[in-house]
Amino acid sequence: MSMNLGPLFEPFELHNLKLRNRVAMAPMTRNFSPGGVPGENVEAYYRRRAEAGVGLIITEGTTVNHPAANGYPNVPAFHGADALQGWKNVVDAVHEAGGTIFPQLWHVGAVRKEGTPPDPSVPGYSPSGLFAPGKPSGKAMTKDDIDDVVTAFADAAQDAKALGFDGVEIHGAHGYLLDQFLWEGTNQREDEYGGSLQNRLRFVVEIVEAVRHRVGPDFPIMLRFSQWKQQDYDAKLVNSPEELEAFLKPLAEAGVDIFHASTRRFWEPEFEGSDLNLAGWTQKLTGKPTMSVGSVGLTEDFISGTFASKQEAVEKAGIDELVARMTNHEFELIAVGRALLQDPEWLTKVKEGRLNEVESFAKKSLAELY
Ligand SMILES: Cc1cc2nc3c(=O)[nH]c(=O)nc-3n(C[C@H](O)[C@H](O)[C@H](O)COP(=O)(O)O)c2cc1C
């Protein structure tokens, strides 16, 4: 069956960035980098998706150079000669295959537990020593700690540019460190980094400004943010378009080029009275190109629990719905996670109308890197 794929396969340009299409691989932690060093298996994994036509690869979260940045085993670091050489090999492989690639720069904050590599004695760091509201964990950051992390993000972005990456994504979502500052539930500071929205934004704004200062005006900076947190899927940073605008404006002014509004289902309206999703509202309010994400390409079986029937699932959550939203310029870019993790050829199959050959996402695929 041939489909109208509308703008999905149109090129996208921003400054020096040229994407061959508007489909990105979403950042997905894979835990296959022992000692923090991405090796040949990681290189082959990303090369395979680039060879199969993915426009932009956003790497798995990779940790900035701070002792408490990492939260999980075998996550790749973004510092140290061996890890950076590993990433250089990944960049070259993706470029050879005609793709583009951003690293996702990450600090997990209070999600880190003592015992985690690289130094097991280091606790989690966070704005107020809280993993979630009412759940103390780790250390509340001092002003010096804040400055160290800001510098670590700037260093990582500078390294990304030097290695040949095409831009960077700053991970400000899902209840990790940056989001812990943004979220009232985990930020109870009484200094200039806590309290009002302006104050809660300050840490992320400082990171974006520091990154911008290091990489210059033309190197793309993408910021990923979300309402949902791993600590609370129903949490909200903002409750109305007006609040969203107040949240986004300082970030855009600090130097964000592309917003990546992370939602779990791309078809869900963000606020009452409009069909626009979070990315749609973000693009409308900032005028900046925005990336959406959430359950694209998952099979009807997977999502039909959300709908009354399979038919309704196809109509509301299928590729046609995505294409319709992109044709309306609700958002310019779309990230695809699990469908591409499962099936490296997913995009080629969509393009060629071979949807019957797409492999359905299965959790057991997380155990392998291919
Ligand atoms: C195995 C796995 C690992 C993930 N790791 C990250 C990550 O490192 N950084 C991040 O921002 N999101 C991460 N996510 C979220 C994805 O980027 C994406 O937003 C989510 O899977 C929804 O997209 P999908 O429905 O297309 O999979 C992860 C998701 C999965 C399934």
Image (cartoon, rainbow, N blue to C red):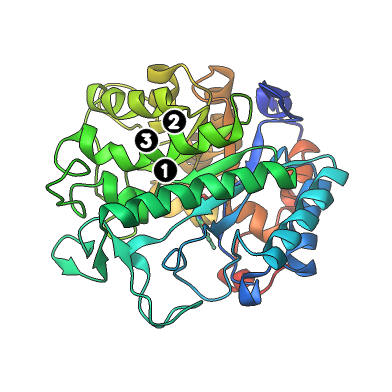
Q: Is residue 130 above or below residue 267?
A: below
Q: Is residue 333 above or below residue 60?
A: above
Dot 1: what SS?
loop
Q: Nearer the viewer, mark 3 or mark 2?
A: 3
Q: Is residue 198 above or below residue 188?
A: above
Dot 3 or dot 2, earlier in sequence: 3
Indicate the position of residue 321 as horizontal and vertical percent values: 54, 30
Q: Identify residue for label 3.
A: 205
Q: Mark 2: few, some, or many residues within 10 Å (few <14, many ≥20)?
A: many
Q: Quadrant of the N terminus?
A: top right
Q: In which quadrant of the rendered view does residue 80 lie?
A: bottom right
Name the residue furthest front.
Answer: 144
With 92 as the anchor, is 86 left or right in this view? Answer: left
Q: Mark 1: few, some, or many residues within 10 Å (few <14, many ≥20)?
A: many
The tag on residue 222 is: none
Q: Identify residue for label 2.
A: 279
Q: Nearer the viewer, mark 3 or mark 1?
A: 3
Q: Nearer the viewer, residue 221 or 11?
A: 221
Instruction: Kindly identify the residue that appears in the image at 88 percent across and 45 percent down.
Output: 96
Q: Identify residue for label 1.
A: 263
Instruction: Kindly identify the residue that appears in the image at 28 percent across and 48 percent down.
Output: 181
Dot 2: what SS?
helix
Dot 3 or dot 1, earlier in sequence: 3
Could you give the CA–CA distance between mark 2 and mark 1, rounded to whole angstroms? 8 Å
